[in-house]
Amino acid sequence: MIGTVEVIYRGIFQKHLGQRITRGIVLAGRQQGKIGISFGRYGDSPERNGIPAKSFAVVADTEDELQVHLSRYEPINNDVTVVVDDTLCKGVESWAWYGLQPVHKLTRPGGTLLVVSLQTPEALLQDCHKKGAEWHLGILPGTASFSGLWVYKDDHTDVRLLGAIAKLAPHVATIESVEGAIRGEWKNELKVASARKAYERASTRRVGPEEGNPEAPYAFELLKWTEMKEGLVIPAIPVKQEVPGWTGGYRPGRNPTFKKFATRTMRPVVDFETCTKCTICWLQCPDSCFDVTPTGHYDANLEACCGCGVCEAVCPVTDCITMVNEQAFANNTSQFEAYEKDPAAYKAWLTATITDKATTQRSHGFRYRGQYADELAEAGAEGEPKGGD
Ligand code: SF4
Ligand code: SF4
């Protein structure tokens, strides 16, 4: 019997996390006499912070089974898709393809999307696209674990996910095999306890074919070979885009087919009332994301913004730009348009948004032992004792 798992992670910040999960699955399979392989695809090279990337694990009872399965380019009918940052549920756009892929595109019908999240299933389903087939939404309570550049922060997210996989897809790995793999590989009983707790905590919900975000993910047709120009021709990006209805202002030309917003975990929210029009955010944004409006304001274009946070760091006005978690937003519409339409309503929305601790808190893994239990208790997770693992 074959078991396949795909891990979708954010490039660089979660690269080692993705690798450790898929490796752990193969090691757990080995505990049960299976053979397997873990490998990365759609990596984060050229290095790009936050770019959606993938690792896979395949375990099989026999070598022949494994070889037949791996004769395919990549596993396309995965039993489990693991998502280690819940903002990826909005869809993934990688270096490796064009357009936005639904997060469960490679999950088999009836399979499980396992998300690390403190959101409810209903909230996550507002982001996950409609699949047209039945699937299961598994949740491991927790916040996304991020590390710095190529550094791994060992906060047990890896073993928690292995424990959750054992609960939701025991044919891939049993909890006993996960525990055996952790003892063999990491020799750490605390990690074993974390995997067991996650096994108990992980929950699942059946999702119908018609449930989920009804929007069609952004896509476009690639040129057919008969339509391509002779030789290697890469059209340059125009310097400026015309914006219907604008007199003055400036919107730079941008790549029309690679939009970058799937790279983002947090987005900038701008207070146009306190903005002094100093231009610093516009000058410093590494992706030229700011549109200069005809009024001289700077509006972060949310299809282009990759959420790096530089604009928040350089803006000289207190609370004029605030990074807010993507989970607080349902679309990429212009903030300046909303402000122009109703400045008072925009200000009220902005104040509520940037003062919401749940969505403005930075997520950089754990800083002390017991933080995971504290976070769950704060989020109201049932029965969670303080100061646990
Ligand atoms: S977060 Fe700010 S600086 Fe970074 S890409 Fe977005 S708009 Fe530009
Ligand atoms: S850096 Fe801040 S104050 Fe300056 S233009 Fe940008 S948003 Fe306005």
Image (cartoon, grey):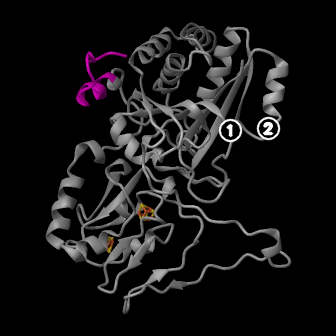
Residue labelled with disc 1:
76
Left or right of 29 in this view: 253: left
Residue 67 on the magenta span: no
Residue labelled with disc 2:
72
Label 1 to label 2: alpha-carbon separation: 9 Å
Residue at the spot x=25%, y=24% of the render?
Answer: 377
User: SS class of the residue under badge 2?
Assistant: loop
Q: For ligand 1, which image quadrant applies? A: bottom left
Asked if 248 appears above or below 387 in the picture, the reply is below
Asked if 345 appears above or below 67 in the picture, the reply is below
> What is the chief secondary structure element of the magenta stretch?
loop
Range of residues picked out in magenta: 373-389
Q: Residues within 10 Å of mark 1 (few under 14, many from 20)?
A: some
Amino acid type, callout 2: Arg
x and y, in percent, of residue 234 in the image: 73, 75
User: SS class of the residue under badge 1?
Assistant: loop
Residue at the spot x=48%, y=15% of the render?
Answer: 195
x and y, in percent, of residue 333 in the image: 37, 66
Q: Residues within 10 Å of mark 2 (few under 14, many from 20)?
A: few
Q: Are marks 1 and 2 in contact (CB under 8 Å)?
A: yes
Location of the C terminus (image quadrant)? top left
